[in-house]
C-alpha cells in the first residue's frame, strides 16, 4: 500500500522527549490490525495493542527521527522538513522476538524519509509502524523486509 501526501511532524513521546514522525490514519492501519487479530488469540491481541496505545496514545505513526537522535540536531536544520510531503510504502506485518517478548509492526519504506535522514547526517533506519507488543518494544533488532510474515513473504518473493 502506498501513502501519498504524508507529512513529517514534530511530536513528543510519553517521556516528553521530542522526535519527528509521520502520523498514519487508523483507516490505513486497520487491515494490518485485522491480519494481526487473525494471527493472535483475542486476549493476546488485546494485550499487545493496549501496550502500543499506552505508549503511543490512540494513534499510529512512523518514526522519522527518534527521541535519541533529535537532540543531536538543531531545530534550524530540522525546520525545513516539518510538513514536508512524502510517500510511505506499507509492505506488510513484521515480527521480532526476544525471549518471551515479541513485537508486531508494519514494515515500511520511504525514499523521502531516508533522504531527509541522510541530509541530516543520520544513518538509514528500519522504518516501521508499531502495532503491538507483549512487554515492551524491541529496538535492537532489524524491522525490515527480512521480518515480514506470511503472506507478505510470498508477495515479496514474487516481486
Image (spheres, rainbow, N blue to C red):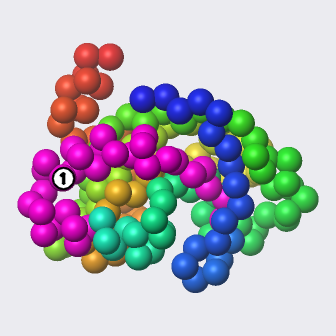
Q: Residue at x 41, y 65 (%)?
A: 140
Q: Is residue 42 magenta?
A: yes
Residue situated furthest right in the rendering: 76
When the figure is inspected, residue 91 is found, relative to residue 64, above or below; the finding is above
- Of 17 and 41, nearer the camera is 41
Q: Name the spot of residue 89 as percent of width and height, x first.
A: 48, 33
Helix, strand or loop at label 1? It is helix
Residue situated in front as seen by the camera: 31 or 123: 31
Q: Position of residue 155 (x, y in %)?
A: 25, 24
Q: Quadrant of residue 108?
A: top left
Q: Residue at x 56, y 56 (%)?
A: 63
Q: Relative to 54, is 72 above or below?
A: above
Residue 59 seen anywhere in this rendered image of the structure: yes
Name the magenta segment's main secondary structure.
Answer: helix
Left or right of residue 76, residue 127 in this image:
left
- Is residue 131 placed above or below 151 in the rendered structure? below
Location of mark 1 (residue): 37
List the single residue furthest toward the front: 27
Instruction: Please tell me whether residue 138 belongs to the stretch shown in magenta.
Output: no
Q: Which residues are magenta?
A: 19-48
Question: Percent from the top left, x then y, of residue 24?
Answer: 52, 48
Q: Position of residue 133 (x, y in %)?
A: 29, 67
- The residue lying toward the viewer, choosing from 44 and 68, is 44
Amino acid at each position: 500500500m502506498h501513502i501519498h501526501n504524508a507529512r513529517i511532524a514534530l511530536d513528543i513521546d510519553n517521556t516528553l522527549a521530542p522526535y519527528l514522525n509521520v502520523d498514519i490514519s487508523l483507516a490505513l492501519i486497520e487491515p494490518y490490525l485485522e491480519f494481526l487479530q487473525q494471527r493472535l488469540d483475542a486476549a493476546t491481541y488485546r494485550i499487545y495493542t493496549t501496550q502500543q496505545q499506552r505508549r503511543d496514545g490512540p494513534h499510529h505513526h512512523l518514526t522519522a527521527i527518534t527521541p535519541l537522535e533529535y537532540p543531536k540536531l538543531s531545530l534550524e536544520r530540522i525546520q525545513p522538513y516539518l510538513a514536508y510531503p512524502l510517500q510511505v510504502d506499507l509492505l506488510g506485518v513484521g515480527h521480532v522476538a526476544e525471549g518471551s517478548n515479541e513485537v508486531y509492526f508494519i514494515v515500511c519504506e520511504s525514499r523521502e524519509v531516508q533522504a531527509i535522514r541522510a541530509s541530516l547526517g543520520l544513518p538509514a533506519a528500519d522504518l516501521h509502524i508499531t502495532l503491538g507488543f507483549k512487554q515492551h518494544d524491541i529496538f535492537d533488532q532489524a524491522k525490515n523486509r527480512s521480518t515480514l510474515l506470511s503472506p507478505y513473504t510470498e508477495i515479496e518473493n514474487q516481486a
